[in-house]
Image (cartoon, rainbow, N blue to C red):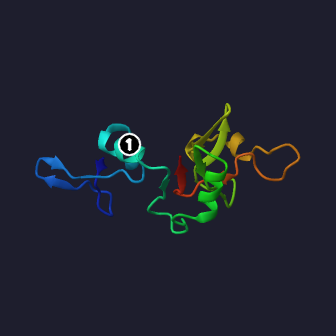
Amino acid sequence: MLPAVDFSGKILLQSPSSIKLAPNGNGSLFDAIKSRSDVQYAIKSLAYLQVVGVDNAIGKILDPVFLGYACENNLQATIKTVERESESEPVGLVVDKNGVTEVVEYTELTDEMRKAREPSKEKATFWYSPPPGPFIYN
């Protein structure tokens, strides 16, 4: 939970002596999965879990091609990406980091990393960005 703020950035109060709290966005789901046994129990009863960020206007719920691909290939996790518009676009990126696929926030990229190119390719090494979901977990 994070402090709730108004449109000018002023922290809102729940009462004269306490700060009003608000969910911290899509990440609240992962906090709940980690810390709440009832959420863990509910998820364990599912064959698949799809997560789509609330601010993803193009996220297709239960996309049959995406879900079918995950099932057919028996993938533990699947993520869609979109090409970012430019090297300087402030979005997180899907990267292969020491053999592990991760999402790296744009604030963690150096200028050198932003401009890096794959050998014999025109596109940047770090080009694909995940929209807020969808993810499918098996």
Q: Residues within 10 Å of mark 1 (few under 14, many from 20)?
A: some
Which residue is pictured at 32% across the width and 57% down the height?
Answer: 9
Residues 26 and 46: in front is 46
Residues 74 and 124: in front is 74
- When the figure is inspected, residue 73 is found, relative to residue 37, above or below; the finding is below
Q: Disc count in the image?
A: 1
Q: Position of residue 53 (x, y in %)?
A: 47, 58
Residues 9 and 63: in front is 63
Q: Secondary structure at mark 1?
A: helix
**Can see residue 114?**
yes
Q: Position of residue 85 (x, y in %)?
A: 68, 61
**Can see residue 129?**
no
Q: Position of residue 115 (x, y in %)?
A: 74, 46
Q: According to the image, label 1 marks what residue? A: 33
Q: From the viewer's perspective, is 104 left or right of 23?
A: right
Q: Position of residue 131 (x, y in %)?
A: 56, 58
- When the figure is inspected, residue 29 is found, relative to residue 96, above or below; the finding is below
For this orientation, the residue located farthest to the right is 120
Which residue is pictured at 21% across the width and 52% down the height?
Answer: 20
The image quarter containing residue 82 is bottom right
Identified by mark 1, the residue type is Ile
Which residue is pictured at 44% across the width and 49% down the height?
Answer: 46
Which residue is pictured at 36% across the width and 50% down the height?
Answer: 24
For this orientation, the residue located farthest to the top is 98
- When the figure is inspected, residue 107 is found, relative to residue 87, above or below; the finding is above
Q: From the viewer's perspective, is 47 left or right of 89?
A: left
For this orientation, the residue located farthest to the left is 16
